[in-house]
Amino acid sequence: MFQSFDNRAPPGNRSKNVARLREQLAAHGLAGYVVTHADEHQSEYLPPSAERLAWLTGFTGSAGAAVVMTDEAALFVDGRYTIQAASEVDSDLFEIVDLVAAPPAKWLAGRGAEGLQVGYDPMLLTVGEVERLRRRLRGSGTELVALEENLIDAIWTDRPEPPTGAVSLHPISHAGRPAREKIAELQATLGEKRVDAAVLTLADSIAWTFNIRGADVAHNPAPLAFAVIRANGRPTLYIDGRKLSNSVRSELSDLAEIAEPGALAGDILRLAAEGSAVALDPSATPIAMARMIEGAGGQVVQAADPTALPKARKNPTELDGIRRAHVRDGIALTRFLAWFDNEAPSGSTNEIAAVEALERFRAETAEADGEPLADISFDTIAGAGPNGAIVHYRVTRGTNRAIEPNSLFLVDSGGQYRDGTTDVTRTIAVGTPTDDMRSRYTLVLKGMVAVTLARFPRGTTGTQLDSFARASLWRAGLDYDHGTGHGVGAFLSVHEGPARISKTGTVALETGMVLSNEPGYYRPGAFGIRIENLIAVTEAEEIAGGERPMHGFETLTLAPLDRRLIDVAMLSEDERAWIDAYHARVRETLSPRLDEASDRAWLEAATRPLGET
Ligand SMILES: [Mn+2]
C-alpha cells in the first residue's frame, strides 16, 4: 500500500523537544526561532529528514509554521488545518493561530520589544518569504537573524538521513522532447532576459528539464536536486551521487556537469564573483542563495522559474500519455465505484476499507495494462458523512468512520503512472439522498460543467474562469473556500504551477495546460460535495459565426457522475446534453476494457441518459 493510516509525526516527546530548542535559543542569544513546513526545494511532500515542524509540534499538515519564543510558542495553520492541529498539537505547548488572520510576522510584531532577535534557517525560507516578513516587522523592534546552523537539526538526534531514491530516465516516448532541446530553450530564455544564469531549486523543474524522475519523497516522482543553467555553457546538476546508477550518470553527463549538492554554494559564489546576473524565483529560492550572490558581487534578478511555463504547456506526446493514464485510471475507478455500490448499502464498510479497495483496483488495473502504478498522487481523501466536509481530510485508524446508509461519501484520489498523473473526485450517494443533498450536488455539478464548456480568448486567466464554477452556487447564496483548479504535472507533481483556476490565478491559460476543475460545497458536521475532472486547454478555434478564435477544454477524466444525485429539473438543455454525452463517452471508452460482466452492467446503468430509469 502507498497509503498508510497511522499518525505520521516523527516519534518524540514534543515538550522535551521544545525545551531543548529553548536551550538553543539561550545558547545563541535569541528571543525566538522560526520553523516552517519546508525543505530546501519547497517540496509539497517532505522527506522524513525535513519533517522538522512535525517533530517539534506534532502537526502533520502540508503547510504551516511555528515560532518558539523563550516563554511562549505558536503554531500557524490555515483554515484547512485548524481542526487537525487542535487534535495533534499540545495546546499547553503551542497556541494555535490562524495563519491568514495573524501570520507569524503579525504575531511577532505584537510581541515587539526593542532588539528582539528571532532566528531562522535561510535555506528553508524563500527570498519572497523573508522579504514579506521583514516588511511586516519593520518598526516593530523585532529583527530576523539568518543562522548558518539549523537549530532543529542540532537537537533532533534521531533525525532520519536525507533520502537517496534512485533516479530513472524519463524516456522520450513519455517526455516528448529531448532534454537537450529543453535546455537550449531555457538558455535562449536567459539570453533574452539578459541574465547569465538561473538557479533551479524545485524538484519538478529539474525532473522536467533533464527528463529524469526520482524516488525521494512520497507521491511526487521528482528527485531532490539543484541545477544551475548558464546562458552560455553547460548546465550543472547538483545531486547526491548515490541516487545515480552508472547508466543514468552517463546519460546525464552528456547533458550537464554532475556535482554533489555541497558544491553548489562554491559555484554560486564563483558566478557572483564574475559579476554575473543570476535569475532566482523569489517564491522558490532559499534567501541564502540570494545573499550569497549579492555578497559576492553578483546581481540577483528576480524572475519566475524559467521552466514553469514550458513545463505547464504539455506537448502532444505528454497529452497522449495523460489520456492513456486517464483511461486506465477510469477503469480502476469504475471497478471501485461498482464495488462501492455493492458494499456500502449494507453499512458494513468504512473509509479505510474504501481507500484500500481503490488503491487495489488502481494497482491491479495498471499491472494488467502493463504500466504499473508508480504511486498514488496524494493520500486519498475518503470522507464519509460529516468527514466529507473536511476539505483536506486524511483518514487514520483514529478517525476511520463507518459508511452509513442515507449519507454522502466523498472520494478524491489519483494515481502516478509513468505516462501521466491523475486526480479525480466523485461524491457518491449511499442509500437515498435527501432533496437538499441533490440540489447542492446539482449546483456544484452545474459549476463543473460551466468551466468545462467555457470558451475563452487568448490571455484569459484562471481568475476569470473561477467565477464560472461558482455562479450557480452564488445565485443560491452558497460558495466554497478553496480554489476551483490547480495545474497538474505529467508524471510529476499533482499540484503544479503556474496556472490555476482560482481567485489568485493570474497566469493566462495556454494550449496544453492540464488543470483540475473541482468546485464543491461543504456543510460542516453534515456532508461534503466535490466533483473533480482534469481538463486540458485546447487550441483556440473559430466558432461558427464567431469573429475571434477561442480556447476551450478537453475533459481527460473518465468516470461516471452519480445520476442519483442529479436533479435534472435544475439543468439547462446544454448542461443535460453535456452530461449525457460525457456518460456515453465514458461508457464507450471503458466498457470494452472492463473484464467483469458485472462491472460492465454497472457502468451501463450508471451512464444511461438522464431521466431514463
Ligand atoms: Mn485536485
Image (cartoon, rainbow, N blue to C red):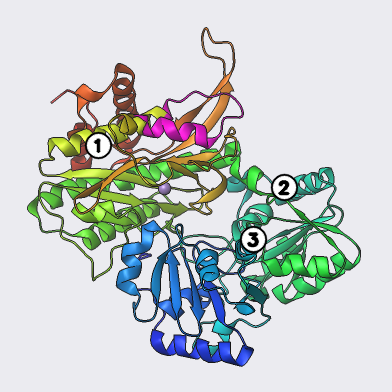
- Tell me what residue is drawn at x 61 percent, y 40 percent: 313
Residue extending farthest to the right is 274
x and y percent of residue 437 in the render? 18, 39
x and y percent of residue 83 in the render? 31, 64
Q: Mark 3 is on which residue type?
A: Arg
Q: Earlier in the sequence, mark 3 or mark 2?
A: 3
Question: Any magenta on residue 552?
Answer: no
Question: Mark 3 — residue?
Answer: 135
Question: Mark 2 — residue?
Answer: 182
Q: CA distance from mark 3 to mark 2?
A: 37 Å
Near-viewer residue (359 or 311): 311
x and y percent of residue 106 in the render? 52, 64
Tell me: 603 left or right of 483: left
Tell me: 185 left or right of 60: right
Instruction: Mark 3 vs mark 2: give the one in front.
Output: 3
Q: Looking at mark 3, is its residue's CB closer than 8 Å to ligand 1?
A: no
Q: CA distance from mark 1 to mark 2?
A: 43 Å
**Secondary element type, mark 2:** helix
**Secondary element type, mark 1:** helix
Instruction: Mark 3 vs mark 1: give the one in front.
Output: 3
Quadrant location of the N terminus?
A: bottom left
Task: Choose top left, top right, bottom left or bottom right for residue 74.
Answer: bottom left
Residue 441, numbered label: 1
Question: Which range of residues does the magenta coloring cover?
Answer: 451-471
